[in-house]
Image (spheres, rainbow, N blue to C red):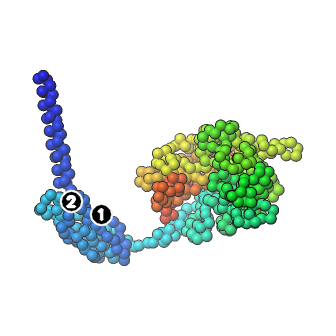
Amino acid sequence: MKSKQILSLSLAACLTIGSLAGAGEAQAKAKAKKPVLSKTKMTAYIGKTKTLKVKKNGTKKIVKTKWTLSGKKVAKLTKKKKTSVTIKGLKKGSATVKAKVWYQKKGAKKKKKVTLKCKVSVTKYVSPEAKKKANVLNATTKYQPLAKLAAQHGFKLGTVVNYTNVTTNDNYKNLVKYHFNSLTAGNEFKAYSLLDQAKSAQSKDGMPVMNYEKADAIISFAKENGIQMRGHVLVWHAYMCDWFFREGYDTSKKYVSKAVMQKRLQYYIKEVITHFEKKYPGVIYCWDVVNEAVADQNVGNDNRNLRKDNQFYKILGSDYVEQSFLYAKNTVDELGADIKLYYNDYNSFYKSKREEIVNLVKSINSYAKDAKGNTRKLCDGVGMQGYIGGYGTQNGCMNEQNISDIKKSIETYAALGCEVQVTEMAVRNYMGTAAMKKKHAAFYKKLFQMFVDVNEISAKCTGKSDEEIKKLEESRPLKAVSIWGWQDDPSLDESSYGYSMNGPYCGLFTELYAVKDSFKNVYEVLANKRI
C-alpha cells in the first residue's frame, strides 16, 4: 500500500514538473517572438524598386516603424509605411536599411521596440533575355564545342529539339548548334504527329498521308547547321492514333485485317524514311524503328516479354517488331542509304529488361534471310534511354550503381554485334540546394568518365597500322550520347510530366543558359584527349 502511495506521488510530481516545464517553454517562446523583416539581404537594381516588409511574426500588432538608410547615394527609401518601405536603386554599391519597430505582444499593453537591418546590394538591371544572350555568348566562346571533344572519344553528343525552339528561340538555337552534333525531334517525327487523318481518309489508294511541315522545319535547321539527326520514331504504341488501325481511318469503323495493316505499316515506314532521305540526304544517320515494345512486368508470352495491349500487337501479331525492322531495312537498302536501324527503350540498363531486350534483338536479327539463304541483320543498334534516378522523387537520384549498370549494358548489347547509343538522357535532380548541385556535378563527371573509358582503345593501338587503328575506332561500342535534360527548369510544376521525367535541376545549363558545374565537369572529362 505504502509503495503504491509513493508511486502515485512520484507520478504526480513528474506531471507537475512536466506541466511547469511546458508552460515555461511556451512563455519563453512567447517572450522570444518579435517582428522580423521579409529579407535580411536583397539585391536592388538601378532605376528600379523593391519592397521590404515588416512581418508581425506572432506578435499582436506593429504600432509604428521608423525607416532609415545608410548609403544614400546608392539607394533611397520611398513610400515609408508602418509595415513596408520601397527601395529604389540609384547607383552600384551597398547600403543598409534600418527599421526601428515598435510593436505589442499578444496579451500585453506595453509597447516594445526592436531594430532590424537589411543589407542591400545595388547593381545594374539585366533582363532575363539579355542574361540568356550573355550566357550563350560565354558558353560558345569560352569553351570548345562539347560535341567536338566527344568526337575524340568516338561518340556523338546530342540533344532534343522541338519545332517552337528551332523556329523562334535564337539563344536556344545558338547554344544547341554550337555544342551538339546530333539532334532528335521530341515529338514531330512520331507517327501521331505526321499522320493526317482527313487526307488519309480521302486517299485514293487507301494508304496513309503524312504532313511533314513541322518535321521539315526541324530537319532543315539541322541541315543548315551541319548537324545530323536521329529519326525518332517509326513505330511506337503509346499515344498512337487509333484511327490508323481502322477501316477508312474512321474511329467509328472496324479494325482492319492483318493483311491490310501490314500493307499500311510497310507503306508508312517506307514513305517516311524515303521522304527525309531524298529531301535531306545524309542528315538522318539512324532511325529508332520501334520504341518501348518490351513490357515492364512479365506478361507471360515469351522471352522477349512484349507488351500485348496495343493494336500493333493485336492486329499484326507477336512479330510486329520484327516486321517493322524488315520493312525499314528493305527501304534503307533500296535507297542505298547509310542509315542505322535501332531498337530504343527505357530501363534498358536494368538487368531484367536488359535480358529481354537481348532476346528481342536476337529475334529481330534471325527473322529474315536474303536470296542466298543467309540471315539478314535487321537491327544495327540499341538505344538505351538514359532517365537516371527516381521518377518524380529525389530518392534514387545520382546513385553510382546506375553508372555500373549502364556500363554493363553497353558491353552486353555490344556483344550482340550492335552499336549502342544512350538516348533521352536526364540525370535527374529535384533539389536546387548547393549540396545537391555539387553532387549532380560529381555524378555527371563519373558518368562521362565511364562513357570515355568504355570506348578507350589507346592500349590496343600500340604498333598498329593506320588501317588497323581505324578498325579499332569503328569497333568502339558507344556511338552517341543524347542529353534531353540539358537545361534546368525550376518553374516546372510538381504535377507536370516534365518535372517527373527530367527533374527541375537536371541540366548542364541553368534556365538562363549559364554553364553549371555539371557542364564544367563533363567538359573537363571530354577535353582529356585520348585516341
**In the image, residue 456 lies at what x, y percent?**
64, 46
The kind of residue tagged 1 is Ser
10 Å neighbourhood of mark 1: few (<14), some, or many (≥20)? some
**In the image, residue 241 lies at what x, y percent?**
66, 57
**In the image, residue 85 lies at what x, y percent?**
27, 71
10 Å neighbourhood of mark 2: few (<14), some, or many (≥20)? some
Residue 513 appearing in the image: yes
The kind of residue tagged 2 is Thr
The residue that mark 2 highlights is 59
Q: Relative to the observer, which residue lies in front, 524 or 294?
A: 294
Vertical arrangement, residue 90 with respect to residue 461, above or below: below
Look at 22% across and 70% down and name the residue there: 82
Quick check: 442 left or right of 459?
left
Q: How far apart are the alpha carbons under marks 1 and 2?
A: 15 Å
The residue that mark 1 highlights is 38
Which element is circle 2 on?
loop
* Quarter of the N terminus within the rendering: top left
Q: Relative to the observer, which residue lies in front, 54 or 172?
A: 54
Quick check: 434 left or right of 302?
left
How many labels were placed on the picture? Answer: 2
Vertical arrangement, residue 380 with respect to residue 132, above or below: above
**In the image, residue 223 lies at what x, y percent?**
69, 66
Q: Residue furthest right?
A: 372
